[in-house]
Amino acid sequence: MKRALLTVEHLTMRFGGLTAVDDVSFTAWDGEITAIIGPNGAGKTTVFNCLTGFYQPTVGRLLLERADGERFLLERLEAYRIGRDAKVARTFQNIRLFPRMTVLENLLVAQHTSLMRASWYSVAGLFGLANYRHAEDAAIEKARHYMELANLVEVADWQAGNLPYGAQRRLEIIRAMCSDPVLLCLDEPAAGLNPRESAELNDLLLLLRAEKGVGILLIEHDMSVVMRISDHIVVLDYGKKISDGTAEQVQNDPRVIAAYLGEEEVA
Amino acid sequence: MAYLLQQLINGLTLGSIYGLIAIGYTMVYGIIGMINFAHGEIYMIGAFVAVIAFTAFSNLPLVVAIMLVLLFSMVITAAYGWTVERVAYRPLRGSFRLAPLISAIGMSIFLQNYVQLLQGARNKPVPPMIQGGFTVMQEGTFTVQLSYLQIMIVVTTLVLMAGFTHFINTTSLGRQQRACEQDKTMAALLGVNVDRTVSLTFVLGAGLAAVAGVMVTLYYGVVDFYLGFLAGLKAFTAAVLGGIGSLPGAMLGGILIGLIEALWAGYFSSEWKDVAAFSILVLVLIFRPQGLLGRPEVEKV
Amino acid sequence: MSRSIASAMGPGGESLVKELGFTALIGLALTVPLISYETIDDVGGLQLQGRWAATAFIVAALVMGRLGIILLRTPGRETWVAAGGALAAVVGLLDLFRDTVAGVLGLERWPAISPSYTLAFLLGVGGAVLAIRAAVQISRRNSAISKAERDARMESLGEQVRKLVRVFAAVAVLFALTLPFMPFSNRYVMDVGTLIVTYVMLGWGLNIIVGYAGLLDLGYVAFYAVGAYSYALGAQYLGVSFWLALPFAGLLAASFGLILGFPVLRLRGDYFAIVTLGFGEIIRIILINWYDVTNGPDGISGIPRPDFFGLATMTRRGSDGLPAFHEYFGLEYSSEHRVIFLYYLIVAMAALVAVFTVRIRRLPIGRAWEALREDDIACASLGINRTTVKLAAFGISAAWGGFAGAFFATRQGFISPESFTFIESAIILAIVVMGGMGSLVGIAIAAALLIGLPEVFRDLAEYRMVAFGAGLVMIMIWRPRGLLSHREPSVLLADRSPPGRPVPAKAVAAGEVAQ
């Protein structure tokens, strides 16, 4: 039975006179990969920034329903609470790692909230109490597990900024996963990757969906990624939703073809 | 009433000077996004050059002397502005975020002590040159004075401001300056010499600060090497209050800071007037960081 | 004439003349009023006195230096530049030590070229810098190794430096602990030592907010002042003892930090810096003008010295029912006891900061600080509340400043607002920046240099702040990450690897970057 994880209703975002996102509604289902595609400037990243609290939407309701029944209205939450409480994690179009920290440290920062609690807000940690040591060991094991999935164990102690580009993309994804999200938002994860890295990325995303049951929302230009792994595709153009459905449905939608090929007459 | 009027006149004069300095902050911030912490020292150098020049030209007719001193101080101070950018800021483009500000603090400390080393720590006086004025109003024993010097300061500032705005808005150099402010990479692609434009910004800002320096030398008749620190901070406050990046904002902010300071000193106590200026800085940054005439900034994700 | 020189220089000669001419013009503008005329106070007003020799010398030196830099642009001329630079360096050096040189050579006097010692020094340094630059360029060109190899070599050099740093740190700690018992130790050495360690502590305290959280605090001295005044006032009005006041000084400073921090921490980096500066100045103006409480610019004197942990006083005679220190331990009285006691007190306080810093860096809060410095937007997306994390850094930093302030008050016995100017904040900041933000050892070295060197070169005190300002600029240009810029990871998977699954750390660290 499909369960709605994220319901976006009438999302509108205006910057001064410019309407970047115009009355967009869609649903992302739990345990599925939903892709948002569209030409440049279609408003995809703006949707993400509204979802993750970096922009305050002008109009709209962003409802997140977790499997445990908790519900969050994302438009009312600050960015960090969307990550911490609603458990929506994201990556960025221009990778945002902590470049001078190691791969492992990046993954531990992602587990800040749980480790903070375990260290009794640093008190237990300062005195080196056993409960904190155990929590840290567990956090490192979790990080190791994800590094194995993303093939990054070998470079665990490298500075993140020194990794090759593809590895940085994978690291950013597993860093988001380390915060135990229910919804993972990926902003063009395949941008700048070569075909081999792109294939590795596909495998990683499918693995995450299969093993962790996390819902994935994906912005992507690379159609080889989108068509192969998405369960469901939303197409935006000039801030408006023009199509919504499976890969096959979207591919055959004349409005989508028109938007991408620039045909004037719309069926 | 009369007292208030006198404070307003004094505040307007002071505010004109702050406004001239504030333009330097606002333009540099607009084009390379840094707080040129050494700009107060540039102004101080302008004042010192004025003192030396006034002493050197003391036997020339007054009008000629003032004109020459203005020109001389602007040229010399502009050279300092150019050098500061070339030596301390340009090599840091692309360095880490706080590097230019730290470098600017170093530059500020350097210039202050450099002038102290060369010219001594004592106050440097110049004889009063422009005396007299109008009596605007008489109320009991209190006379409201509007001195010729005050008129000159305000008028000079207004003329410079008008000329300067005209320059930025209509000339090709001004257009390049605005283009770089919007997007340096794109401007460079379109053939704007970005390095030269940034240099020009520093030169212009320093030139205006030099005028402020000359005016303050005439107004107070005394300068010292520490003059730039407080004035710089207040002018920066003015730039922030007006909306950083906005030229009319800098002028407006300068005049407001001048008025607030004069009124505060006139009605409360002059010891606490610096607290007033700093409190405004803190309050504006917290509650209205875009200032009065600036555009709000969106966190870039 | 200039035309003929230009053509003699070959292609590009004209632009060379242009560039040199421009340099000369700028040089003239920089020197003509401010250097060429000295203003002398006279009965009738100011008099001007010319300093034209210095002016001409500086302009000429600038043009020559510029020529050297231009020549370095085209390969093949480095040897000339190196030779010229070296010549200038030697001339400058000979000029600087002209008396000694004349003495050694048995001459009446050495015919100096530079108009003053300062200029001789600058000529020497400038020449040396130019020569070194040329030499580096030559060696780069001649060495066949690629950039990658050079990086690898630098990496291994860095590894050695790291090991050396550890050894150095151990030696430094040992030295600090035994300083009072060294044969050369005397009152003066102890005073300078105490001063340096105070700045080490301040540097380490500021490091938390600047080095880890990456927020430029330009008003750190405010917390130092709050700490100092809270003990001084507490002792004066309430008769509070140092040991009771110490925790309060820290807490009070921390509360000030939190109150200020809460509204301003969301500001962008450079605005935040200016606001902290404004806050520092506000505190100072309050201290100056709130005459009834703080005694204004006259300051507070007669601040009591700390007793020996409530067991004995550090004075000649005991008081308040406490015996004197030397009586308590059955020693001969010596005024040095108190000096040494204060020294160990600040060493212990600094050590506390160091231990705390090392530990907290490995905790989630410490990692969050560093992550915030690296990318605060990513932090927010990972559920980290930026405001509270920054606030924690700000409060803790402030608390250490407060502790150091209380110590300062009790050591000096006298405080006034003059001790808490912006320059003080700038010096502490320079210590952190120069040391390499985040590196405790680097900060300690920087404190020793920045506080110790001026003590050594006391005759040159007037040059101190000029050199300080110029140094700050130069560090930003040449080593923006400070002297010791290496960042030690807070945790290594290599250290944690369960048996049977070794992580080839060395192989990886030296290994090729894929792609």
Image: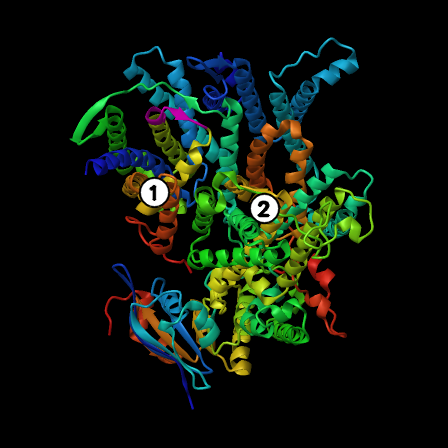
Nearer-the-camera pick, B192 or C272: C272
Q: For this view, does C104 lie left or right of residue B210?
A: right
Determine whether A130 is above or below C363 in the image: below
Residue contact at pointers 2 and 1, CB within 8 angstroms: no
Q: Does C211 lie within the magenta span?
A: no
Between the C-alphas of marks 2 and 1, the distance is 29 Å
> As drawn, which residue projects farthest toward the bottom?
A1
Q: Position of residue C337 (x, y in %)?
A: 75, 46
Q: Position of residue B224 (x, y in %)?
A: 44, 27
Color theme of the render: rainbow
Name the secondary structure under disc 2: helix
- Check disc 2 and give the amino acid type: Val
Q: Quadrant of the N terminus of chain B?
A: top left
Q: Position of residue C236 (x, y in %)?
A: 55, 49
Nearer-the-camera pick, B204 or B266: B266
Task: Report the residue marked by disc 2.
Answer: C433
Are the residues under marks 2 and 1 on the same chain?
no
Circle 2 chain: C
Q: For this view, does B51 lie left or right of residue C111?
A: left
Q: Residue at x 83, y 51 (%)?
A: C330
Q: Quadrant of the C terminus of chain B?
A: bottom left
Determine whether B1 is above or below C350 in the image: above
Name the secondary structure under disc 1: helix
Task: Report the residue marked by disc 1.
Answer: B238
Task: State the extent of the magenta-drawn residues as a range.
Answer: B217-224
Q: Does B221 lie within the magenta span?
A: yes
